[in-house]
Image: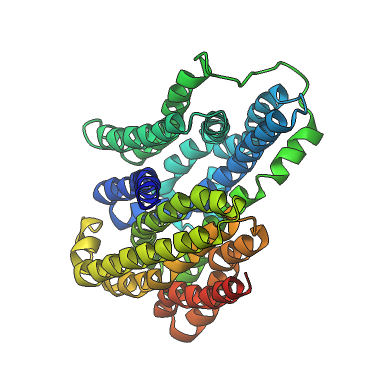
C-alpha cells in the first residue's frame, strides 16, 4: 500500500504542479515585458478566466460523468452526451466572444482598471475573451478522454498545452516583440494543443466516445451540469476571491498592491497544486478502502497523507520565509521598491496559511472520496469563497493591506476548526 500511495501521489503532484507552473510562467514573462502594470492587468483579467473555466468545467466534467453513468447503468444514451457537451460549451462561449469583440474596455473598467491598466490590458483581455470557445471546449475533450479510460492521455494533453504556453509566451513576447498580445495568444492557443493530443484517443480503436449530429437536449445538458457543480465551485471560488482581493487592494493602495497580490497569488497556485496532488493521490485509494469496508486501511491512508501534506507545508513555508526577497525579485523586473515593500512581507504572511490549508485540502479530498460530499463541499466553499471573503473584508477594514494578506491564514484556521469537527463526527 505504501508503494501504491507513493505512485499515486507522485504522478498527481507532477500533473498538478506542471499545470500551475504555466500560470507562473505567464506572470514572469509579463512582469519582464510590461512590469508591475502588466501583472496588474493580468490579475484583473483572472476572474474572467475563472468564469470561463468554471462554466466549461461544469459542462465538460458533468457531461463526462453522465456519460460514464450511462455506460455503467445501461441508459443507452451515452452517445448523446459528448455532442451535447461540445455544442453546449460552444454556445456558452458566445457571450464571452461578443464581449471581447465589442465591450473589452467596459469589462476592464468593471474589474477596476484605470486608464493606465486599460491601455496595457485591452488587447490581452480581448484575445482571451475571443478564445473562450477553445478554453471551454477543451474541458469537454479532456474530461471525456479521462472518463473513457485514458487518463494518461488527458494528463499528457494538459501538461503539453502548458509547456506550449510557456514556450510561446517567450517566443511571441520577446523574439517577436508582441508584448501582451503575444502572452494572450500563447494562452489562448494552448487549448488547441490539448485538444489535438486528445484526438490520439478519439481516433484510436479504444475510443468509445461518439459525436452524434442531433438537436441538443437542454434537459440532458441541465442534468449533466448538475453533476458538474462541484467542478464549477472549484473554479469559480478562485475567481471570486481574486475579484474581491483586487477591489480591496485597489482601494487600499492602487495598482501596485494588485501587482503584489498577482505575484503572491500565482506563487500560491503552485503551492496549492502540491497539496491538491496529495489529495488526488489519496482519493482513489481511500474510495477503494471505504468500499471494501477496510476502516483500518482507510484511517492509515488519511493519517499518512495528512503527515505528507504537513511535511510539505513546513518545508514550503520555511523556504518562502527565508527566500521571500529573491522570490519577489524574480517578478519585479523594474526593481520597484514599492512593489517589493508590499509583496515581500505579504508573501510571508500569506504563506503561513499553508500550514493549515494542507490539512483542509487533504480532508476535503478524503470526504469526497468516501461519499461525504456535503462535508467536502462545506470545506471547499468555506476556504474558497465564504470565510476568505468575509475575513478579507473585515481584516482589511482593521489593518489595511496587511489585513488582506492575513485573510488567507485566518480563513484556513477557521475552516480547519470546521473540518476537524466534521472529521470527529465521521
Q: Is residue 245 above or below residue 215?
A: below
| Image position of 179 (left or right of 114) | left
Q: Residue furthest bottom?
A: 398
| Image position of 175 (left or right of 128) | left
Report if residue 111 is visible in the image.
Answer: no
- Give the quarter of the figure containing the C terminus: bottom right
Q: Position of residue 218 (x, y in %)?
A: 79, 33
Q: Residue furthest right?
A: 219
| Image position of 166 (left or right of 396) | left
Viewer-closest of 230 and 33: 230
Viewer-closest of 127 and 236: 236
Q: Position of residue 200 (x, y in %)?
A: 45, 19
Q: Position of residue 347 (x, y in %)?
A: 32, 69
Q: Is residue 371 above or below residue 254?
A: above
Q: Who's the residue at 67% across and 61% down the image?
A: 374
Q: Position of residue 320 (x, y in %)?
A: 26, 67
Q: Who's the residue at 67% across and 24% down the image?
A: 83
Q: Who's the residue at 43% across and 75% down the image?
A: 409
| Image position of 368 (left or right of 410) | right
Report if residue 408 is visible in the image.
Answer: yes
Amino acid at each position: 500500500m505504501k508503494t501504491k500511495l507513493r505512485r499515486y501521489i507522485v504522478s498527481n503532484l507532477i500533473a498538478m504542479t506542471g499545470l500551475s507552473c504555466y500560470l507562473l510562467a505567464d506572470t514572469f514573462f509579463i512582469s519582464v515585458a510590461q512590469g508591475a502594470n502588466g501583472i496588474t492587468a493580468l490579475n484583473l483579467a483572472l476572474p474572467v478566466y475563472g468564469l470561463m473555466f468554471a462554466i466549461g468545467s461544469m459542462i465538460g466534467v458533468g457531461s463526462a460523468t453522465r456519460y460514464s453513468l450511462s455506460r455503467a447503468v445501461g441508459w443507452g444514451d451515452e452517445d448523446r452526451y459528448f455532442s451535447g457537451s461540445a455544442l453546449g460549451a460552444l454556445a456558452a462561449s458566445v457571450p464571452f466572444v461578443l464581449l471581447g469583440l465589442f465591450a473589452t474596455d467596459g469589462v476592464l473598467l468593471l474589474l477596476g482598471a484605470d486608464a493606465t491598466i486599460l491601455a496595457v490590458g485591452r488587447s490581452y483581455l480581448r484575445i482571451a475573451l475571443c478564445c473562450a470557445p477553445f478554453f471551454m471546449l477543451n474541458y469537454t475533450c479532456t474530461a471525456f478522454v479521462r472518463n473513457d479510460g485514458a487518463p494518461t492521455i488527458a494528463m499528457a494533453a494538459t501538461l503539453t498545452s502548458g509547456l506550449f504556453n510557456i514556450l510561446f509566451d517567450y517566443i511571441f513576447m520577446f523574439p517577436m516583440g508582441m508584448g501582451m498580445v503575444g502572452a494572450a495568444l500563447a494562452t489562448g492557443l494552448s487549448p488547441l494543443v490539448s485538444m489535438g493530443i486528445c484526438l490520439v484517443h478519439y481516433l484510436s480503436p479504444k475510443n468509445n466516445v461518439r459525436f452524434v449530429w442531433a438537436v441538443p437536449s437542454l434537459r440532458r445538458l441541465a442534468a449533466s451540469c448538475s453533476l458538474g457543480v462541484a467542478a464549477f465551485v472549484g473554479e469559480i471560488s478562485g475567481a471570486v476571491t481574486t475579484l474581491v482581493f483586487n477591489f480591496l487592494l485597489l482601494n487600499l493602495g492602487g495598482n501596485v498592491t494588485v501587482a503584489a497580490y498577482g505575484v503572491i497569488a500565482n506563487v500560491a497556485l503552485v503551492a496549492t497544486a502540491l497539496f491538491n496532488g496529495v489529495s488526488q493521490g489519496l482519493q482513489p485509494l481511500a474510495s477503494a478502502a471505504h468500499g471494501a469496508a477496510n476502516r483500518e486501511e482507510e484511517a492509515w491512508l488519511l493519517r499518512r497523507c495528512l503527515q505528507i501534506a504537513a511535511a510539505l507545508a513546513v518545508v514550503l513555508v520555511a523556504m518562502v520565509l527565508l527566500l521571500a526577497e529573491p522570490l519577489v525579485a524574480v517578478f519585479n523586473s523594474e526593481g520597484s521598491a514599492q512593489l517589493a515593500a508590499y509583496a515581500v512581507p505579504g508573501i510571508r504572511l500569506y504563506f503561513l496559511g499553508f500550514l493549515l490549508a494542507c490539512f483542509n485540502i487533504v480532508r476535503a479530498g478524503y470526504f469526497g472520496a468516501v461519499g461525504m460530499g456535503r462535508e467536502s463541499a462545506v470545506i471547499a466553499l468555506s476556504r474558497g469563497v465564504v470565510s476568505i471573503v468575509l475575513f478579507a473584508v473585515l481584516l482589511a477594514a482593521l489593518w489595511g493591506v496587511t489585513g488582506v494578506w492575513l485573510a488567507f491564514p485566518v480563513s484556513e484556521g477557521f475552516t480547519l476548526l470546521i473540518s476537524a469537527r466534521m472529521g470527529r463526527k465521521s
